[in-house]
Every structure is written in structure tokens, then in C-alpha cells.
């Protein structure tokens, strides 16, 4: 109670300032009186209520709830021995960690590493392919892996309990919120499988708990407890964003709170400037640096564990690939010299190897084609040769290294022709010059001369030498001044759908499609490079991978040609319009249906509307001068009602705007915030009820939530046999529990 | 945007120290602050007075007003007859005017008001609408089009925009140099001129938008005279202006947002109990505004649609966008005239509504293997073919035979079979993947034996007629989905041509998604119908009528649908982020022999000045918020009130007309920024006064504030003295702007032609001008 009281006073520094002057301006002394009176009353009412019986309930209730949570999440968890729904993805990704093979996915690695960990603990060797709908083999202890996941889901229940305590809900409301999480069929169902959602929910819940706790400690700034909770908030944020990027939405909520908090403190004249600065420092450390460190650490672990070549190689730079075990890129000499045989890779996103073949352009110059090609092939090999004015290459000569500003010719190894460009429009990108191979070692002109411009080098600042894998360079034609470029434009069938290579007159140093690097390099005269020379800087890989993730994420747009029965639309979620069949609906399969508890869904959605009306109501009353609310009430509405409400929007609206395919489970984090808002509304509405009515109301609501959960429990625990047995649960057509 | 201003609402409440009176003017300030005692007198005079603010130098204002209007007229009408060819989007809007004059129904994504104005202009000069503005560069002289009259209409509105801007500033109580700066930025803007002296809608849009702002300010100034005659007059005029904006283009919604936000803040402050309004009174205020600013504009908006439907009484190129019911209301409509009831055993052609391809089949078969390795049934090909051919002929066969002598109509939901006449085979679909779509079923044909025997079921198709009137199937007017009876897939086609084995004809396949709009087919004609047939000898059909609202909702839906579909790329499209910096223009017109070109571009200097001032405003407000939070008051209440309520309103107008474009997926052009540019000119004028009109005493106040002295005092700003600073700033800005205007004028007016050097000198930000070589 003491802390509660003090919080109100402390905050008053910021918010009261907003209120009191108004009253003074109005000059109505009488009104000031009336405002203060209810505040006193309120305190008198609250005190005894909060102090009595706190000990027993505070210990027993969380234990009972946690026990029930573990039961609802784990009962019959191993019953279905087939790979269910997205277990096919996340189980497979977990396997890659056990096999240590590099893979690529749109989600950050933490959640999948935890899946990998669960497999490791279960003694699984990563050999199973996790094909959708297949039976788990004997050696895979999938039950343990599922239990590991379910533990995260179960722990959400006590977290919800403590969070509602921190939001200062009454005991009865705290129970209600906890029950709504406990008896939420969709949470119970999705936590039972090897998926990321239970972890995402868990860390969302911890973030919400830590930041509410941190908020309540704000009168004890810089105490050890305060520091503990700010650091815990930071860790939670770091974890939630490292599981799925959806975690950024709860991060935004905490960010909003922090901005408001700092703005309030900014208006507190009494606070010394040094203290204020310290508040900034603490938040930058706790809420920015720590989460960033966690996020980076998860990627660092990701790169460290996955040290073998695997299916995700192609997404990364050639330098990164060189560091994976099982690739052949590392036998090359480091520095490139005249006479080296090389392959040259485009560094743009999805770039291929510079390629030429005997086929000619059907139009334009009619000379030999130059393309970019993704497959390894001897037509990708090129020789570095000196330009014609210089001494010609002699295999016996002393080594002549190539570096920035070197002028060279590139000879195609298979056909002996020179890389060449001229003022002929390229076949597709007509604005650019066509690039061809032309002539031979003796026949040719100055348009065969290319100037190397080193753009960057991953391991050195010394640009005087061109290094295998690490150097990014551009090739500028000496005569025309244009840059060799391969955008992602495919040639027609005559070019075998390979990528068009052009020479662009625009000098855009940041256009990575004009950047190239040496991928493989053969030169007998030079020593093999030290393996360590090809170390790929962590930050570069980190950024590269994140950009690749973002690009693929944006590419997950609905395909109009593809029938996707599982996808759903944002407007369907809050009203529980649809559910999702998680597996085949065959009679001899244990069937799971992803559907929420209708009471929780509809109740929480209704509470969002009620809360909006309530805000409007009090705002208008306030503007009309009715002293309904004390400063404490306003703070309570703000921190326990408005912030969860905003949290719901933060987790919901992005999916409205998003163009990608969306599924019902995208709503689950938002649902938690709706549940908290529902808790607030119930709490607010019932706080002045007479005792018998109060208990009656809560009793009825508890019974309803639990009753409907129990009614729908088959969809969570699994439905064996014919789906017609469960037809009684098909309340609406969208709930396709039975055919 | 509204967040910004609602914060202002709160700010007024929070910021007040004990010494400062609360400001109550929420959104738009006038030259005075009514709560400020020193100005109360003027306010009173103002509330009841007529016309603009009476200041000692009012004559100066009037002279300047006349001057800018005259110059605006000259800049807008200069060489208006040049070029005498169709320029850029005149292709569209000129054509629409012709359609109106001819009364032929057309379809466009914009509401009718702006286009009706052009038609009105054409009607005034007696033009009959014979020319259809088909290509950019078509000669007006050769085609005898009164194009100068057409162009005079937008040019006139554009001319009037300048005095409206000037009056807006004047009404808001800004000094003469501030008014002139704002008006000058519009007056000498190559963009505002270039876009508005051609047959385009933007002139109407910008003029109405400027009028809305002006009317609202006039309305707001009448607030002490609530429900008086003038109060009503300006309220209704605001509503009418708003209606004109939205009836011209849908971006007019942004003007509604601007005015709506101001009204919401105003109402919110009225709700304050210290204003002494009872809830009934407040309700009246609320209702009056809702009536004047929502109901009236909406009815006015509907009115233009009524005009639209009335004028366009004949069938025309827009028919295809509408439902058959709608088309039957148009005169000369093929559907209404030629529609014939279809009977069983008629020989017919089926046509796909979207791609206009006929259902076709020929003897060639599907290849056994496709390129991707999938296997076909090797059945006879069924394709979509856009040209007339006997292979397009099919006979509708009943599912159960009946005597030939009976003539039975084909009804909705009947199961029918289709017999391909030339190859004597029956249409069939089965569970084999189509050539391009593994998820869709293949369509093929089978022999009569199979069709009557083992594969009977697979040859059955249901005719599902669209729309409300579902009586018998008719040619042309009945649109239907052709659904395969056993598997419930709809016959569908798309534009991607088949490979060479299918002669580049269209793929026909079975689409599982029955709801898709592109599943729709119709029967085009009955082949070899007996000329004696009773069905042909009916009396000519009467033109039907539909209730207005039915027509309106149908058209409105189609407009939104097609507006969203405008996503194709255009070589001169640009991104919203480029607009304030004027990174790129649009090439409107070129003429090779004279090296003349029209390149639509704003006034580079003017736009950069206006855009930087917008940032300065945001900076000033941010700094003020921060200092106030620390209890430092650098501004006197009147200046702050002006800064937030008046300049802030202009800034809000800019933001509301600019930022929403970032959310739009459709193709965007520089001219979409013009309404926002107008608002930015208002902000510029206002800030010129704020920055340069500051007097010496005020500097001291700032100093005092920085030293955090407890006692703060405000030196009210004198109204008219010492405006020298503003005059210098105004003259400098106008000077630069005029120079830039003259420099770019050849590109705006399309004359004279420029030498290579001249073109190159004008490629300041790398504009893609023509004739640079």
C-alpha cells in the first residue's frame, strides 16, 4: 500500500501539474474541495481491503494456477505422434542446430535455438526431416521436445497473475485475468507443439510484467530493485525480439511508456539535472543496449553453432560461405595477380557469377553473350590479363599483383575472348550498354580495358591489392566510363533465362549490383591463403542476414494462384470468425483445432469497445467540469487501462496494414493485451459494487470462462476418431471442427 | 496531424501559469486574441464588423489585392492558346467533356463535378463534343476544338486562387508583407500555373480547397455571433466549398480532415464548462456543424452524380464497367436492344467478360508433358480466342434429352452440356491439372459416346446467373458463371497466352474460387437464329429506369475498385518524398521542330523556401514545447496563440494534404502535391511575420527566459509598426521566386524553344528534360 500511495504522489509531479493549475485558473475554490474529498474516501476504503489475507492468497493462488497451467498444457501431449502443422518448419530448424548446418529462415534465431536445445536434451541427433504429417520415428523423443515448449506456455499463467497484481487489479480481477489466460483454448493448444509461439507469448508476458514492476518502483529510482527490473525488462525485450520480430510491437509499447515517463520527469523542476541525465543513461543502458546485446548475442550463437555448409548458404556472402565447413572456397590464394584464374561474383542481393558462353546475342552487336549464372560451371572462369600496351603475361614472370586503379583485361577461360562493352543498347535494359566477349588474346581494342575500383575490403584498409572473397570492387570500362552491372533482370530463352549483364553509365557507388568480388581463385605461383584471412566480420554477416530476412519476409505476400485455406484476415480474429485445422482431418488422426475460448475472445473484444467509450465518457465529463476522478484514478486508468489498450493496437494494427499472409496465431500476443484491458474494465466496473453482487458477478464470469473452456477442451487435448463426434462444437461455419 | 493539434488543445490547459489567461481560440486565430484585454475592443468591433480587418493601412491591402489579382490573370492566361495540341492528361479530361456533350456514358475514377464544369464550358461556347482527344499531340486547330475556352475555365479558377490565398492571410490578420509572401509563392509558381492552364481537374480542386480554408476562417471569425446570419452563411459556404473539393477528386478527403480536425478541436474547447455553454447549446453547435459540413456537402456531392446520370443518357464506352441492370437504363445499349432469350439446342458463342475471349476448341490436343514435367490428359484443347471463328460455336444441349419440337428456355442453375459444333465433341472438365495452374482443373472435350456414357457426369455444367433478375438466360444481358457440376469449379481464363502448342491462345481452366469476379461469361449471340423466330419480333424494348441510389452505389463501388487498381507504373511517376524537394517533374508535351516542351515543375526556389520553412515551423514548435516544459516562456500568449492556432492550422492543412500519400499504393505524380504546396505557402507567409516581425523588446524577453528569471513579462507585439524586417524578407523571397519563375517559364508555357545549352542550364536537380542533346 505504501508504494501505491507514494506512486500517486510521485507521478503527481508530472501529471498533477497538468490538472491543478486548471482548477486554479477556474478560481472555483469550492470545486477544489470537492475534488479532494473523494480521494480521502478512496484511501479509507482501499486500505483494509488490500492488507487483509494477502499472505495466503499470494502464495497459494499462483501455485494452484501454475499447476493447472502445466496440466492444461501438457496433458496427453504426446498423444499425436505425427508432425503437426508448423512443427514441420521449426522442428526442422531445430534439427539444423543439432547437425550444425547453416540454414536460412525469416525469424531471428533464439526461439529455434531453444527448440534445438530441447532436441539436444531429448537426445535427438537431428537426422529426422520433420516432413509435415509424418509419424515421428522411435528415436525422436518428440514428447520431451513438446513438453519443453509447453513449459513456456504454462509459465505464461503465473506471469499473467503477477502482472495483474502489478497493474493493481483487485484480487478477484487478478484471478479473472489469470483464468482467462489459463482457460484460453488457443494458448493451450498452440503451446503443445514444437512452435515458436509459446516462447513469443512467454517473453511478451515477461516484458509486460517487468515493465509494470519497473513502473511501480519509480519512486525508488536507482535502488538495487529498480535496477534489477529495468535490466530484466531489457532482457525480456531482447528475448522477445530475438524470437520473432513481432516482439518489436511490445518493445514499441515500452518505448512509448519510457518517452512519456521521461517527458514527465523533464517537467519536474525539482529534479536535479544530473539525476535527470542519469535517468536517460539508465534507460539507454537498460532498454536499448541490453536488448541490442541480447539480439546480437543470439545471432552470434547462431553463427557459432552453424559452422557447416547447409541449405541456407546461398543467402550469404561468398566470404561467409568460405568459413563454413564443407565448402571449397578456401583453398584459394589470398591476393590476386595477373594470370590468376578466378570466378567473379556479383554482390547484389541474389547475385550470380559472371559467365559467358559461345552463344551470341540475337540482336545488338551479335557478339558472344555475357550473363550472370548461379551454378558452378567452367564457363564462369576468367583470367586476369594486362592491357595490350603493357608487357604481356608470361607464366614465368614475377608476380604482378592487382589493386585499386589497376587497368586489366578479363579473358574468358573457355573461349579466350575479352570482356568487352560498346555503345550498343543492352538487350533488355536499353538504357545501359551491352556487354559481350569479343576478340581474343591479340585481337581487340581499348574497350577491353577495365579499371578496378575497390569499394571496400572486409579485412583490410589497404586497397592496393585485390583479395579473394574479401574485396568488393567495381569494374569501370576505361573508354566508355561505364560500370559493369548485373541487376536481377532475366534474359529471354535465347539467353537461357540467365541474368542480364550490362554496363551502366550512372556512377552510383552504393549500387551493390555493380559490386563484384572474387569467389574462387587459382594461381599456382601464389601460396594458399591462411584460413584465418577469410574471417567474415560478425557485424557484416549480421546485417546481411537481417536484410535477407526482411526481404524474404516482405516477399511472403499472398499468392492469388495458391489456395490457402489456412490463412485468415485481420478482421476475423477479434470476433473469432475462424479457427485453423492444425493437421489432416482424417478419422484415424488425432485432430487439433486452433480456436480460442469464445468467451475470452468476445469478452476481451467487447472490453476494448467499452474502454473506448469509457475514456470518451470521462474525457467529456472532465471537460464539463465534473470532478469524477482523482489523480490516482487517472493514473490507474492510464497505466493499467490505457497502456494495455495501446498494446493491443500496437500488436493488431500492423497486421491490418501488412500485405503478407496472416494466420490466426498472429493475433495471440494482441489477445493478451485485450485480456488485460478486459481485466481493467471489470475491475473498474466492480470496485464499488456491494459485496454479494461483487462475488456473484465474479463467480458467474469464472464459471462461464471455465465452463466454455472445458466444453471446448477436446480441440486442445486432441480429438481422436470421426470429426462428426465433435459437431456440437461447430457453432459457426468458420469453425470447421467437423466437416 | 490531428494528434499534433489535439495536443495543442491540451497544451492550452496545461501550459498556463497563474499569470496567463487561458487562450480559447482553438484552431484558427484571428488578428486578435479575444481573451487578451488589450485587444478586446478590436475584437468586438471585429465580431460585428463587415469585411476584412480594419487597419489603418487597409487601403494598402486593397491595392495589393487588386495588384496580385491582375498579375495572376496575366500569368495564367499568358499564351493560353499555346500549344494548340492535346497536352498530357487533356487526353482524358477533354475526352470526358466530349462524352458529356454527346451524352454517351463513360466511366472514370474521379467524381463528376470537375469534368462537368468543362462540359459546361464547352456547352457555353456551343461545342458539340465531336473530338475525342485520342492522342497527345493531336491538333486542336485541325479538329476545330474550342480549346481556349476549355482552358480558360481552369485558368480563371487558378487566377482566383491567388486572391483567395491572399484573403486567407488577410482574414487571419497577418501583415501585408506576410500576405504578399504567401500570395506571391502561389502567384509565381510554375507548378500552380503549369497544371492549371490546361484541361485538367487540379485547378478546380485547388481553388475549392483554398476556398474551404478561407470560408472556414471567415466562419470562425463569426464565432461571437453564433447562429447569426453571417455565421450560417460562412458555415454553409465552407460546406459547399468542401463539397466541391471532394466532388472533383477524392483527395478532397484531406481537406475534410483538415477542416474536421479544426472543428473537432473547436468543439472540444466549447465543451469546456468554463465556456459556459449548456449541453443543449453545445448540441446545437454540434448539430449545426454536422449539418453544414457533412450533410450539405454530401447531398451536394450526390447532386453531381444525379447530373452525371441525367446528362449521360446514352450507351457508351463506360457500359462495360456496369451491371446489366444498369446498362439497360441507357439508350442504344446493345444489351437492351439485342438481348434474346436463349433456348436449348441453340447454337451460341460464349464470351469471357474480362478478357473478351470466346470459348474455343480445335482439333489439336494438349501435349502429354508440359515444360515443368507435369502430365496432361492429352485431350482436345479448349482455349480462349478473341476473334470470330466457327470453332467458337457451341450448342447448348439439355442434360436429359427432350423432343426437338419443344422449345425450352435455359434457366438459372440448369445443368447443361455444351457440344462443340465443328469437332462434334462435348465440353468436359476433370481432375487433371491445367497447363499453367496446377491447382486448377483442365478443360477438354470428349466424344459423344463418352459424354453419354461413362463420363456423362463430367460433361455437366451449371449456369449460375449473376445479379438479382434471374429469369431465363439471355444473350448479352445475362452474365453467368459456368460451374462444373460434379467438381464445382468455375470456367475461367486469363490473359497469359499458352505456348506455341496452343497457338498463343488463352488457357481455359476450372477455378476453385467460385467467388472470383473474373469467372464471368456471357452468351454473345445465337448463331443461325431463324429470322422468323418469335424471339426476334418483339416490340423494341423500353429503356428501364433504376432508382438513383442504386445507380449511385453501383458506380461508387466501381470507382473505388478501379482507383485501387491503378497501380501500373508510369515513366514520370514519382514518390511523395521527392515532392517537397521538387526532385522530378513530368514531361507534358514536346514539339521537335521548334524544340519546345512543357515540363511540369514547381518553382524550384519557391518550393525549397516553403519546404524549409515547414521544417522551421516544426522546429519552433518543438523548441517551444521543450522550453515550456521547463517553465521557460519565450513567447507571449498572443504570439503563441497565433503560432499554434493559425500557423499551426496551415501546417496541419499541409500535413493532411501530404502525408496520406505515403500510404497510397497507386501511381503518384508531382501534381498531387499542389494542394499541400498551397498550404505550405500559407505557412511561409505566416512564419515570415513570426520570424522577421519580432521587435527588439521581444529579444529581451527571450534573453530573460534563458536566464530562467522567475518573473516573466510579455511585451505585446505592436500591430503595425516596424514591419521593415518583414518587408525586406518578403521582397527577398518574392525577388528570388520571380527570378526562378522567369528562368523556368519556357518550360511552363512551352515556349520559346530552348537551345541545348538552355536546357542543360535548367537541369538543376537532374530533371529529365527533353532536347538536352
Image: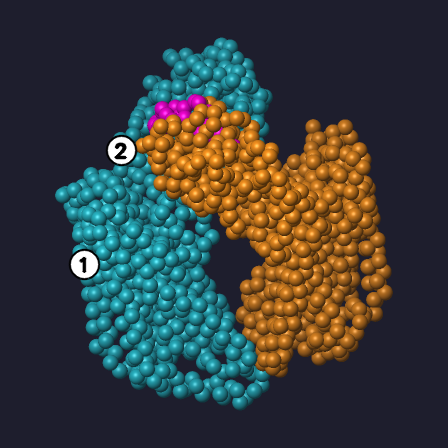
Q: Nearer the viewer, mark 1 or mark 2?
A: 1
Quadrant of image for the N terminus of chain B: bottom right
- Residue A75's disc number: 1
Q: Are marks 1 and 2 in contact (CB under 8 Å)?
A: no
**Image point (27%, 38%), residue name:** A101
In this rendered view, identify the residue nearer to me: B92 or B196. B92
Examine the rendered structure and indicate whether residue A512 appears above or below residue A702.
above
In the image, residue B9 lies at what x, y percent?
Answer: 58, 70
**Image point (46%, 23%), residue name:** B500
Q: Have a look at marks 1 and 2 and say if they share a chain.
A: yes
The answer to if B373 sits in the magenta stretch is yes
Q: Residues within 10 Å of mark 1 (few under 14, many from 20)?
A: some
Res. A315 visible in picture:
no
**Image point (34%, 43%), residue name:** A105
Residue beneath label 2, please? A325
- Residue B631's disc number: none
Query: On the picture, is B388 further left or further right than A512?
Result: right
Q: Which colour is chain B painted? A: orange
Examine the rendered structure and indicate whether residue A611 appears above or below residue A431.
below
Query: On the picture, is B719 further left or further right than A59?
Result: right
Q: Chain of mark 2?
A: A
Res. B142 visible in picture:
yes
Q: Residues within 10 Å of mark 2 (few under 14, many from 20)?
A: some
Quadrant of image for the C terminus of chain B: top right
In this rendered view, identify the residue nearer to me: A475 or A374. A374
In the image, residue B491 lies at what x, y percent?
Answer: 44, 38
Label whose residue precedes the other's in the sequence (1 or 2): 1
Chain shown in cyan: A
State the extent of the magenta-drawn residues as a range.
B355-383
Amino acid at each position: 500500500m505504501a508504494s501505491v500511495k507514494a506512486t500517486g504522489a510521485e507521478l503527481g509531479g508530472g501529471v498533477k501539474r497538468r490538472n491543478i493549475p486548471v482548477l486554479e485558473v477556474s478560481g472555483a475554490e469550492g470545486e477544489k474541495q470537492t475534488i479532494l474529498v473523494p480521494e480521502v474516501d478512496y484511501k479509507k476504503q482501499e486500505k483494509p481491503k488490500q492488507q487483509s489475507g494477502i499472505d495466503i492468497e499470494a502464495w497459494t493462488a499462483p501455485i494452484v494456477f501454475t499447476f493447472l497451467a502445466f496440466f492444461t498444457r501438457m496433458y496427453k501431449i504426446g498423444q499425436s505422434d505425427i508432425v503437426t502443422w508448423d512443427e514441420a518448419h521449426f522442428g526442422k530448424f531445430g534439427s539444423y542446430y543439432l547437425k550444425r548446418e547453416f540454414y536460412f529462415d525469416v525469424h531471428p534465431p533464439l526461439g529455434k535455438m531453444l527448440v534445438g536445445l530441447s532436441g539436444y536434451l531429448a537426445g535427438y541427433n537431428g537426422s529426422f526431416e520433420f516432413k509435415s504429417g509424418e509419424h515421428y520415428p522411435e528415436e525422436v523423443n518428440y514428447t520431451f521436445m513438446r513438453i519443453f515448449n509447453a513449459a513456456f506456455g504454462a509459465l505464461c499463467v503465473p506471469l499473467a497473475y503477477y502482472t495483474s497484481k502489478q497493474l493493481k487489479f483487485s484480487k478477484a480481477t487478478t484471478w479473472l485475468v489469470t483464468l482467462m489466460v489459463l482457460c484460453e483454448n488457443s494458448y493451450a493448444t498452440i503451446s503443445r507443439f514444437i512452435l515458436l509461439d509459446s516462447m513469443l507469448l512467454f517473453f511478451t508476458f515477461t516484458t509486460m510484467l517487468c515493465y509494470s514492476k519497473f513502473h511501480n518502483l519509480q519512486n525508488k529510482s536507482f535502488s538495487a530493485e529498480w535496477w534489477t527490473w529495468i535490466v530484466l525488462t531489457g532482457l525480456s525485450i531482447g528475448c522477445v525480439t530475438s524470437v520473432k520480430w513481432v516482439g518489436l510491437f511490445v518493445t514499441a509499447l515500452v518505448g512509448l511508456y519510457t518517452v512519456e515517463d521521461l517527458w514527465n520527469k523533464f517537467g519536474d523542476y525539482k529534479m536535479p539535472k544530473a539525476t535527470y541525465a542519469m535517468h536517460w543513461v539508465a534507460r539507454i543502458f537498460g532498454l536499448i543496449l541490453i536488448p541490442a546485446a541480447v539480439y546480437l548475442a543470439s545471432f552470434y550463437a547462431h553463427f557459432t553453432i552453424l559452422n557447416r555448409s547447409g541449405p541456407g548458404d546461398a543467402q550469404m556472402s561468398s566470404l561467409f560461405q568460405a568459413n563454413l565447413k564443407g565448402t571449397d572456397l578456401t583453398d584459394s590464394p589470398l591476393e590476386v595477380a595477373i594470370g590468376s584464374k578466378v570466378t567473379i561474383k556479383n554482390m547484389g542481393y541474389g547475385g550470380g557469377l559472371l559467365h559467358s558462353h559461345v552463344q551470341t546475342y540475337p540482336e545488338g552487336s551479335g557478339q558472344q553473350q555475357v550473363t550472370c549464372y548461379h551454378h558452378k560451371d567452367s564457363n564462369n572462369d576468367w583470367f586476369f590479363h594486362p592491357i595490350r600496351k603493357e608487357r604481356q603475361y608470361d607464366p614465368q614472370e614475377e608476380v604482378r599483383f592487382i589493386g585499386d586503379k589497376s587497368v586489366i583485361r578479363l579473358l574468358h577461360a573457355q573461349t579466350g575472348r575479352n570482356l568487352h562493352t560498346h555503345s550498343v543498347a543492352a538487350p533488355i535494359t536499353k538504357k545501359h550498354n551491352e556487354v559481350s566477349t569479343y576478340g581474343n588474346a591479340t585481337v581487340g581494342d581499348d574497350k577491353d580495358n577495365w579499371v578496378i575500383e575497390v569499394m571496400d575490403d572486409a579485412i583490410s584498409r589497404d586497397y592496393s591489392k585485390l583479395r579473394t572473397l574479401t574485396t568488393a570492387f567495381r569494374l569501370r570500362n576505361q573508354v566508355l566510363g561505364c560500370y559493369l552491372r548485373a541487376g536481377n533482370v532475366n534474359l529471354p530463352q535465347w539467353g537461357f533465362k540467365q541474368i542480364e549483364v550490362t554496363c551502366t553509365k550512372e556512377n552510383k557507388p552504393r549500387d551493390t549490383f555493380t559490386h563484384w568480388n572474387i569467389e574462387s581463385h587459382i594461381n599456382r605461383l601464389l601460396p594458399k591463403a591462411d584460413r584465418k584471412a577469410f574471417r567474415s566480420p560478425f557485424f557484416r554477416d549480421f546485417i546481411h542476414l537481417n536484410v535477407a530476412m526482411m526481404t524474404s519476409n516482405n516477399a511472403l505476400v499472398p499468392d492469388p494462384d495458391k489456395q490457402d485455406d489456412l490463412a485468415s484476415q485481420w478482421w476475423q480474429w477479434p470476433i473469432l470468425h475462424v479457427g485453423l485445422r492444425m493437421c489432416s482431418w482424417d478419422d484415424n488422426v488425432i485432430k487439433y483445432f486452433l480456436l480460442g475460448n469464445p468467451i475470452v475472445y468476445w469478452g476481451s473484444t467487447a472490453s476494448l469497445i467499452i474502454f473506448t467509450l469509457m475514456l470518451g465518457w470521462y474525457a467529456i465529463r472532465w471537460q464539463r467540469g465534473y470532478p469524477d476522478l482523482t489523480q490516482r484514478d487517472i493514473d490507474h486508468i492510464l497505466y493499467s487501462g490505457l497502456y494495455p489498450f495501446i498494446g493491443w493496437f500496437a500488436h493488431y494494427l500492423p497486421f491490418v496494414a501488412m500485405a503478407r499472409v496472416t494466420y490466426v496465431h498472429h493475433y495471440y500476443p494482441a489477445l493478451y493485451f485485450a485480456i488485460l484491458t478486459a481485466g481493467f474494465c471489470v475491475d473498474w466496473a466492480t470496485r464499488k459494487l456491494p459485496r454479494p453482487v461483487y462475488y456473484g458477478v465474479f463467480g458467474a464470469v469464472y464459471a462461464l470462462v471455465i465452463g466454455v473452456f472445458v466444453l471446448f477442451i477436446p480441440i486442445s487435448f486432441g480429438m481422436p476418431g470421426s470429426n462428426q463426434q465433435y459437431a456440437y462444437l461447430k457453432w459457426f461455419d468458420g469453425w470447421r471442427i467437423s466437416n | 496531424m490531428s494528434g499534433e493539434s489535439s495536443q495543442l488543445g491540451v497544451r492550452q490547459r496545461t501550459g498556463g501559469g497563474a499569470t496567463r489567461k487561458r487562450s480559447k481560440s482553438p484552431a484558427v486565430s484571428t488578428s486578435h486574441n479575444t481573451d487578451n484585454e488589450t485587444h478586446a475592443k478590436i475584437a468586438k468591433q471585429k465580431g460585428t464588423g463587415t469585411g476584412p480587418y480594419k487597419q489603418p493601412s487597409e487601403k494598402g491591402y486593397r491595392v495589393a489585392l487588386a495588384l496580385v489579382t491582375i498579375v495572376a490573370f496575366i500569368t495564367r492566361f499568358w499564351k493560353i492558346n499555346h500549344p494548340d495540341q492535346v497536352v498530357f492528361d487533356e487526353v482524358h479530361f477533354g475526352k470526358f467533356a466530349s462524352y458529356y456533350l454527346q451524352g454517351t456514358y463513360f466511366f472514370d475514377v474521379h467524381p463528376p463535378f470537375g469534368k462537368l464544369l468543362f462540359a459546361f464550358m464547352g456547352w457555353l461556347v456551343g461545342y458539340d463534343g465531336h473530338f475525342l482527344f485520342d492522342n497527345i499531340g493531336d491538333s486542336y486547330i485541325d479538329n476545330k476544338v474550342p480549346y481556349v475556352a476549355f482552358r480558360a475555365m481552369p485558368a480563371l479558377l487558378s487566377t482566383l486562387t491567388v486572391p483567395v490565398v491572399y484573403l486567407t492571410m488577410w482574414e487571419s490578420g497577418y501583415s501585408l508583407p506576410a500576405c504578399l509572401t504567401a500570395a506571391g509563392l502561389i502567384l509565381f509558381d510554375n507548378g500552380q500555373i503549369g497544371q492549371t492552364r490546361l484541361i485538367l481537374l487540379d485547378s478546380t480542386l485547388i481553388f475549392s480547397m483554398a476556398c474551404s480554408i478561407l470560408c472556414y476562417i471567415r466562419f470562425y471569425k463569426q464565432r461571437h455571433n453564433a447562429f447569426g446570419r453571417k455565421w450560417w452563411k460562412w458555415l454553409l459556404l465552407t460546406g459547399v466549398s468542401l463539397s466541391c473539393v471532394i466532388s472533383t477528386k477524392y483527395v478532397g478527403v484531406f481537406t475534410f480532415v483538415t477542416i474536421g480536425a479544426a472543428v473537432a478541436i473547436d468543439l472540444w474547447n466549447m465543451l469546456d464548462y468554463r465556456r459556459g455553454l449548456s449541453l443543449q447549446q453545445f448540441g446545437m453547435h454540434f448539430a449545426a456543424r454536422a449539418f453544414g459540413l457533412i450533410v450539405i456537402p454530401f447531398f451536394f456531392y450526390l447532386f453531381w452524380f444525379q447530373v452525371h446520370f441525367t446528362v449521360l443518357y446514352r450507351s457508351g464506352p463506360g457500359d462495360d464497367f456496369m451491371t446489366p441492370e444498369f446498362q439497360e437504363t441507357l439508350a442504344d445499349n446493345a444489351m437492351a436492344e439485342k438481348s434474346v432469350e436463349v433456348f436449348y439446342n441453340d447454337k451460341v458463342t460464349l464470351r469471357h467478360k474480362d478478357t473478351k475471349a470466346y470459348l474455343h476448341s480445335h482439333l489439336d490436343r494438349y501435349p502429354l508433358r508440359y515444360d515443368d514435367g507435369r502430365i496432361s490428359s492429352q485431350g482436345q484443347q479448349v482455349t480462349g480466342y478473341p476473334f470470330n471463328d466457327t470453332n467458337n460455336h457451341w450448342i447448348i444441349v439439355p442434360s436429359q434429352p427432350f423432343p426437338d419440337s419443344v422449345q425450352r428456355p435455359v434457366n438459372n442453375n440448369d445443368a447443361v452440356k455444351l457440344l462443340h459444333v465443328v469437332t462434334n465433341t462435348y465440353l468436359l472438365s476433370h481432375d487433371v491439372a491445367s497447363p499453367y495452374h496446377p491447382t486448377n482443373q483442365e478443360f477438354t472435350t470428349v466424344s459423344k459416346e463418352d459424354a453419354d456414357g461413362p463420363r456423362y457426369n463430367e460433361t455437366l455444367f451449371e449456369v449460375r446467373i449473376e445479379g438479382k433478375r434471374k429469369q431465363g438466360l439471355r444473350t448479352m444481358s445475362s452474365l453467368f458463371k459456368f460451374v462444373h457440376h460434379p467438381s464445382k469449379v468455375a470456367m475461367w481464363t486469363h490473359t497469359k497466352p499458352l505456348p506455341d502448342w496452343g497457338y498463343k491462345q488463352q488457357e481455359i481452366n476450372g477455378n476453385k474460387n467460385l467467388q472470383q469476379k473474373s469467372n464471368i461469361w456471357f452468351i454473345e449471340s445465337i448463331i443461325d437464329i431463324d429470322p422468323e423466330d418469335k424471339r426476334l419480333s418483339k416490340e423494341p424494348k423500353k429503356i428501364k429506369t433504376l432508382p438513383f441510389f442504386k445507380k449511385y452505389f453501383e458506380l461508387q463501388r466501381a470507382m473505388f475498385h478501379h482507383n485501387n487498381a491503378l497501380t501500373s507504373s508510369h515513366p514520370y511517376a514519382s514518390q511523395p518524398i521527392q515532392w517537397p524537394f521538387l526532385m522530378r517533374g513530368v514531361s507534358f508535351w514536346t514539339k521537335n521542330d521548334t524544340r519546345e516542351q512543357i515540363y511540369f515543375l514547381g518553382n524550384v526556389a519557391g518550393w525549397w523556401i516553403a519546404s524549409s520553412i515547414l521544417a522551421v515551423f516544426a522546429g519552433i514548435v518543438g523548441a517551444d514545447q521543450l522550453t515550456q516544459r521547463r517553465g521557460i516562456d519565450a513567447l507571449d500568449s498572443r504570439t503563441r496563440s497565433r503560432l499554434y492556432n493559425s500557423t499551426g492550422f496551415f501546417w496541419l492543412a499541409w500535413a493532411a494534404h501530404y502525408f496520406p500519400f505515403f500510404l497510397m499504393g497507386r501511381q503518384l505524380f508531382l501534381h498531387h502535391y499542389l494542394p499541400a504546396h498551397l498550404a505550405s505557402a500559407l505557412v511561409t507567409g505566416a512564419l515570415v511575420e513570426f520570424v522577421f516581425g519580432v521587435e527588439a523588446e521581444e529579444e529581451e524577453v527571450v534573453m530573460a527566459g534563458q536566464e530562467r528569471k522567475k518573473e516573466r513579462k510579455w511585451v505585446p507585439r505592436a500591430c503595425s509598426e516596424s514591419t521593415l524586417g518583414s518587408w525586406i524578407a518578403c521582397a527577398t523571397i518574392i525577388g528570388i521566386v520571380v527570378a526562378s519563375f522567369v528562368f523556368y517559364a519556357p518550360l511552363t508555357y512551352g515556349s520559346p524553344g530552348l537551345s541545348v545549352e538552355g536546357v542543360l542550364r535548367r537541369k538543376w536537380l537532374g530533371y529529365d528534360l527533353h532536347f538536352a542533346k
